Amino acid sequence: MKLSDFKGQETKAQKPQNNIKEDDIMEKYNSYKDLSSDQLNQELFKEVAKQKQNGSFDYQKLENMVEGLKGSLSPENYQNVKRILESLK
């Protein structure tokens, strides 16, 4: 076998892991859709605390996501999200 015979073949380790399913997203949406902003904030801070405790919280990744959404948010909503983001440090 030649090295070129392996071109385009991915091993299981090389394939991106995207285990999120549409049903999972809808389930999360349905669990949060009727919460007040105070309740949503509580849930956010609980999740951040849990991620910080287990070492999976990535502030930079979250900040990059917020910056990516900037064009989709009103200036007021963007500032609100930035304020919340700062409180998560």
Image (cartoon, grey):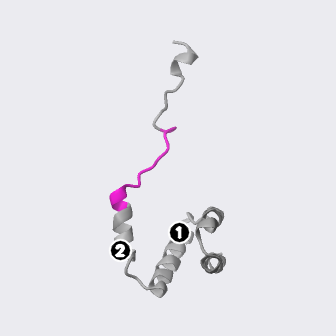
Look at the picture and state if 6 lies above or below 15. above
Tell how many labels: 2
Instruction: Tell which tag, 2 or 1, sits nearer the viewer.
Output: 2
Kind of residue indicated by mark 1: Gln
What's drawn in magenta, residue-wise? 13-24
Image coordinates for residue 62, horizontal then vertical, percent: 60, 65
Question: Closest to the observer: 17 or 24?
Answer: 24
Q: CA distance from mark 2 to mark 1?
A: 20 Å
**Which secondary structure type mostly characterizes the magenta part of the structure?**
loop
**Residue 20 placement: quadrant:** bottom left
Query: Seen in the image, is 46 located left or right of residue 86?
Result: left
SS state under label 1 = helix
Image coordinates for residue 47, horizontal then vertical, percent: 49, 73
Residue under pointer 2:
31
Q: Residue furthest top?
A: 1
Q: Residue at x 52, y 21 (%)?
A: 6
Please rate how many residues cluster around mark 2, counting C-alpha atoms within 10 Å: few if below 14, some from 14 to 19, many from 20. few
